Image (cartoon, rainbow, N blue to C red):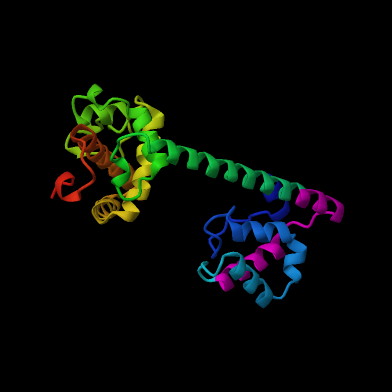
Amino acid sequence: MQLFCVWGQYAHTEEPFFSNVFGVASQTVLERYTPDTLAAIPLADLVAEIAAAGRQRLKAPDDIAQTLHRLARRAFRLHPDEQDARHQSLVLHLDTIRALEHQQQALDKVIARDMQAFRQTLTTIPGIGPVYGAGLLAEIGPIERFPSENALAKYAGLTWRPHQSGNFDADIRPLTADGERLLRYYFIEAAERVRVRDPQFKAFYEKKYHEATHHAHKRALVLTARKLVGVVYGMLTRGQIYDERKLMPH
């Protein structure tokens, strides 16, 4: 709310912008500037500051700076007293975000430490660390509960309703409404990370992405999560580490 009141369409733009609105570089801008003060700073100085805040990792900081200048000029002008109050409120919100992120990092370390006490192989899958590995193990429970990977997929809610009419097979099929939502969340989030780091999952995701006619990313990611169910089931039932040559079909 405060972000919108101060900056209007901040981040809601098709122009080059920060990939993470609440990342370090973006927070630096939001803390240090109001639209009025940012519009007055020389563009070259803003580019240098953005690049430094992003630790020289941002793509095209000069384009981002130009976008920020345009947003600053288009922002609704508040009364100076109200602008100052809203900016201070925005800074406090950013402090809260950082505090929550710090707590999350501390909790992640505890999870990583406690995971060392378990004999498990899920973290050998590229992209699955101790947090998502722990989430999957906790929600699946004893793998013996599931007679097949299809049973596990159904439990996770990664199955689809039939949606056919004659010879027409709809491209858009909703997932079944049942299933454990938290387990589905862990599978989908894990699939997003695995498909970036593992060549076989990446190829599968891209194939499904290009096959889709609607909602390409969402469809491909859910199908990738369903494939991950099969890999996880095979690893847990056999006690194996990840080996795409054995677990991924040719």
* Placement of 166 over or under 28, stated as above or below: above
Q: In the rendering, at what x and y percent does residue 107 appear?
A: 52, 39
* Placement of 78 over or under 107, stated as above or below: below
Q: In the rendering, at what x and y percent does residue 39 appear?
A: 73, 68
Q: In the rendering, at what x and y percent does residue 218 appear?
A: 37, 45
Q: Residue at x 64, y 65 (%)?
A: 68
Closer to us: 176 or 50: 50
| Residue 65 shown in magenta | yes
| Residue 82 shown in magenta | yes
* Quarter the N terminus occupies: top right
Q: Residue at x 43, y 35 (%)?
A: 114
Q: Is residue 161 visible?
A: no
Outermost residue on the right side: it is 81
* Placement of 161 over or under 72, stated as above or below: above
In the image, is 101 to the left or to the right of 83?
A: left
Most frequent secondary structure within the magenta stretch: helix
